[in-house]
Image: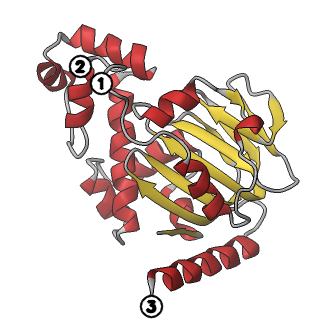
Amino acid sequence: MSAAGADASAAAAAAAAAASAGPDEWAGRARLRPGGLVYGGAVGPATAHAHHSVQFIATLGEEELLLAGPDGVPFGCRAHVVPAGARHAVLRGVPRGLVLHLDPASAAGRLLAELAGDAAGLLPPGLPADPFAAARALDSVLPQGPLPPAVTHPGLARVLAWLPGRERVRLADAARVAGLSESRLSHLFQAELRLPFRSYVLWLRLMRAAELTTLGQSVTDAAHGAGFADGAHLSRVCRRMFGITPSEFTRRILWT
């Protein structure tokens, strides 16, 4: 089958899953890419959580999303940018929507973090009708890659390039790579990424676990491969950071 044919088949399968999903289910297509995650389809609810990525969430239909911020007060919106570390919940999803999760160390993550809040004006006109295609189209117009060296402290830039794929990283090890003291490196993570060092490392490990599940590994094997103690540990972290469990990520979501 050609790449175009395979993509069309995947789109049809995701559309069928979304159509048959209940009002409280996530169902659609998702793709991991360097520095983020792209999702399009039915957006389900998510309990209160705080992830270590910058999130763009939007509806593509007439229905509004119903979210809650750090204060727990509900509000409706068509699109919203949630900065890294901000506690929030999806109280009511929509049948057709999109979600982007962006590494706070990426150019796109930094750009969106500065626009946190209502983001209806960031949805470009003429997006494709298919939610996943719309998510990819939106992602394609955002800056790609890491922050330019002029924006990031050179020691922090070295650590950000060194971290991916490493397990059980200590702050002391990262500080040696940066050529900085531990306290100075911790300050840079907070000042430039708005996240503690350990939180950013946890985000990378969770993305590694998601990558392994897309390759067909079980939740338990993916947990071990990403440095978690077991599948239960991964599930707890996933729910704390995304408001849903790994099984909800894989049940009706087609990873492409």
Residue positioned 39% across, 47% down in the render: 206
Q: How is the image coloured?
A: secondary structure
Question: Label 2 crowding class (10 Å Cα cut-off): few <14, some 14-19, many 20+?
Answer: few
Q: Which residue is mark 1?
A: 149
Q: Position of residue 95 (x, y in %)?
A: 77, 61
Element at label 3:
loop
Element at label 1:
loop
Residue 29, compared with residue 203, is above or below; it is below
Element at label 2:
helix
Give the CA distance from mark 3 to mark 2. Answer: 46 Å
- Residues under numbered marks 1 and 2 in contact, where contact means CB atoms less than 8 Å apart: yes
Residue type (three-letter) at the residue carrying disc 3: Met
Give the mark nearest the N terminus, 3 or 2.
Answer: 3
Specify the farthest residue to the bottom. Answer: 1
Left or right side of 54 for 167: left
- Front-most of residues 91 and 60: 60
Give the CA distance from mark 1 to mark 3. Answer: 42 Å
Residue positioned 36% across, 35% down in the render: 146
Q: Which residue is mark 2?
A: 154
- Front-most of residues 181 and 160: 160
Q: Position of residue 172 (x, y in %)?
A: 15, 20
Residue type (three-letter) at the residue carrying disc 1: Pro
Q: Which residue is mark 3?
A: 1
- Front-most of residues 154 and 163: 154
Question: Label 1 crowding class (10 Å Cα cut-off): few <14, some 14-19, many 20+?
Answer: few
